Image (spheres, grey):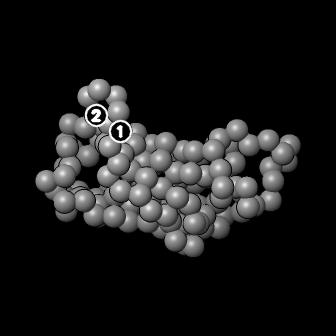
């Protein structure tokens, strides 16, 4: 089984960022998107889903979409009150249908940082 997981962190105060709605899409050859799953991080900012290896297209590009607008709308407003980023979209591939793809994200109202954390 492939595992796609994330841990969202609030870059302003260092706390866990949740709940945040998340969807994973597979991009198709004609440019459309097929939803693989949707859900939300828990209060601790974590989400993990397994995907049957037969459902993983190793040559495909995937999008993990974080709906961050609502999360920030419930937090203290940014200094100038303007938030222009309502989503964070990560595009990646899953070349191994049995691997773990853990993509933690540090979020701020108008920027983010992400990395691939490979389990040892």
* In this view, 52 is above or below 86: below
Residue 72 image offset from top left, x and y in percent: 70, 55
Cα–Cα span, label 2 and label 1: 6 Å
The furthest residue to the bottom: 43
Q: Is 38 placed left or right of 59 in the picture?
A: right
Q: Is 102 placed left or right of 111 in the picture?
A: left
Q: Residues within 10 Å of mark 2 (few under 14, many from 20)?
A: few
Q: Residues within 10 Å of mark 1 (few under 14, many from 20)?
A: some
* In this view, 66 is above or below 9: above
Measuring 57% from the left and 45% from the top, which residue is drawn there?
87
Q: Is 105 placed left or right of 35 in the picture?
A: right
**Is residue 119 at all visible to an observer of this figure?**
no
Residue 67 image offset from top left, x and y in percent: 56, 51
Measuring 86% from the left and 43% from the top, which residue is drawn there?
80
Q: Which mark is residue 33?
A: 1
Residue 103 found in image quarter: bottom left
Q: Quadrant of the N terminus?
A: bottom left
Residue 9 image offset from top left, x and y in percent: 58, 61
**Considering depth in this image, is 11 or 38 the residue closer to the camera?**
38
Q: Quadrant of the C terminus?
A: bottom left
**Considering depth in this image, is 28 or 113 the residue closer to the camera?**
28
Badge 1 element: strand
Is label 2 in contact with label 1 (beta carbons under 8 Å)?
yes
The furthest residue to the top: 30
Measuring 42% from the left and 48% from the top, which residue is drawn there?
64
* In this view, 50 is above or below 70: below
Measuring 44% from the left and 62% from the top, which residue is drawn there?
39
Residue 43 image offset from top left, x and y in percent: 57, 73
Badge 2 element: loop
Give the residue number, with chain letter if any, for mark 2: 28
């Amino acid at each position: 089984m492939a595992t796609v997981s994330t841990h969202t962190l609030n870059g302003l105060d260092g706390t866990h960022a949740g709940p945040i709605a998340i969807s994973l899409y597979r991009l198709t050859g004609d440019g459309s998107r097929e939803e693989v799953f949707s859900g939300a991080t828990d209060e601790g900012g974590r989400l993990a889903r397994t995907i049957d290896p037969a459902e993983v297209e190793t040559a495909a590009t995937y999008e993990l979409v974080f709906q961050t607008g609502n999360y920030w709308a419930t937090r203290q407003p940014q200094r100038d009150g303007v938030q222009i980023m309502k989503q964070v979209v990560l595009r990646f591939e899953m070349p191994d249908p049995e691997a773990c793809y853990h993509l933690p994200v540090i979020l701020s109202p108008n920027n983010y940082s992400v990395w691939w954390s490979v389990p040892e």
